[in-house]
Amino acid sequence: MSDNTNEEIEIDLMEIFFLLKSRAVIIIALAVIAAIGTFCVSKFCLTEQFASTSKLYVLSKSTSITSIADLQIGTSLTTDYMELINSRPVVEKVIDNLGLDKEPYSETYESLLPKIAVENPTDTRILAITVTYTSPEMAKKIVDEIAKVAQTSISKVMAQDEPNIIEKGYANPIKIAPSNVKNAAIGGIIMFVLVCGFFIVRFIMDDTIKSSEDIEKYLGINTLATIPYKEETVDEN
């Protein structure tokens, strides 16, 4: 019984393989069309994004690095600084200083915050502030203003020296998103899978008898003879 079951599964898989092979031209053509379409949408419809990064050094003049305790203080300050940089007073001050609340930007705290990323490289007391925006120039302006406002805000809130800006933003003309080639590949792969799935499901759901082999396989009846089908041409005269 187990051998028969395995044989039937193997035959079904082979049938599916040959089914997909016979539809290979259609599957590949649709996948290519989807890839080209996705590429065009990504290139002409999606907004390009650019990134600029500014860096702050956490340890102030009054903090030494002569002991493990001082290093631990610097590490804990890093986390505090990250929270302060993303705070509403800092972000709204940046929006006000640069006029981002006016046209054509119309930014708010809620809309600008997701475009700001603050990271702490491992084993350092450096904060990397990255802003992603629709133009490299504005990305640089915003990230530099955030670093400047954060300096003053951190000094006031934590009652200590201002952190040092060790690197200002750079208006990098190379976009970081969208990746047209990546999006095209994803679109082509998704269409490939969908079309293959469509043919496989239609094949599995199709229970019509197409040959004498199907009669023997599904009904267990041996065929004694077959009658060839021939379409007759009708003479209109």
Image (cartoon, helix red, strand yellow):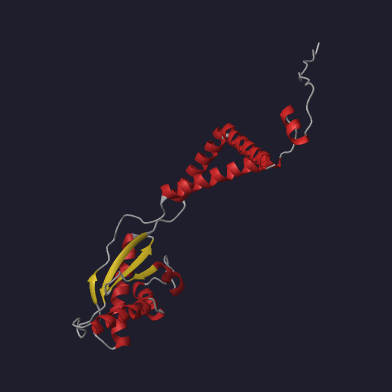
Image quadrant occupied by the N terminus: top right
Image location (x, y in percent) of residue 13: 61, 39
Q: What x and y, as percent, mark residue 71?
A: 25, 80
- Residue situated in front as seen by the camera: 64 or 107: 64
Outermost right residue: 237
Q: Nearer the viewer, residue 232 or 221?
A: 221
Q: Is residue 62 left or right of residue 81?
A: left
Q: Position of residue 122 (x, y in %)?
A: 30, 69
Residue 211 appears in view: no
Q: Residue at x 55, y 45 (%)?
A: 193
Q: Evaluate whether residue 81 shows in this view.
A: yes
Q: Is residue 22 left or right of residue 154?
A: right
The residue positioned farthest toward the bottom in the image shown:
159
Q: Quadrant of the C terminus?
A: top right
Q: Residue at x 34, y 64 (%)?
A: 139
Q: Is residue 61 left or right of residue 116?
A: left
Q: Name which quarter of the figure residue 133 lies in.
A: bottom left
Quadrant in which residue 160 is drawn: bottom left
Which picture quadrant has residue 208?
top right
Seen from the viewer's position, the closer of residues 40 and 80 is 80
How far across and down, in percent of the image, does residue 179 sit?
A: 41, 52
Q: Is residue 72 above or below residue 46?
A: below
Up-down: is 25 above or below 82?
Answer: above
Q: 98 or 6: which is nearer to us? A: 6
204, above or below 156, in the image: above
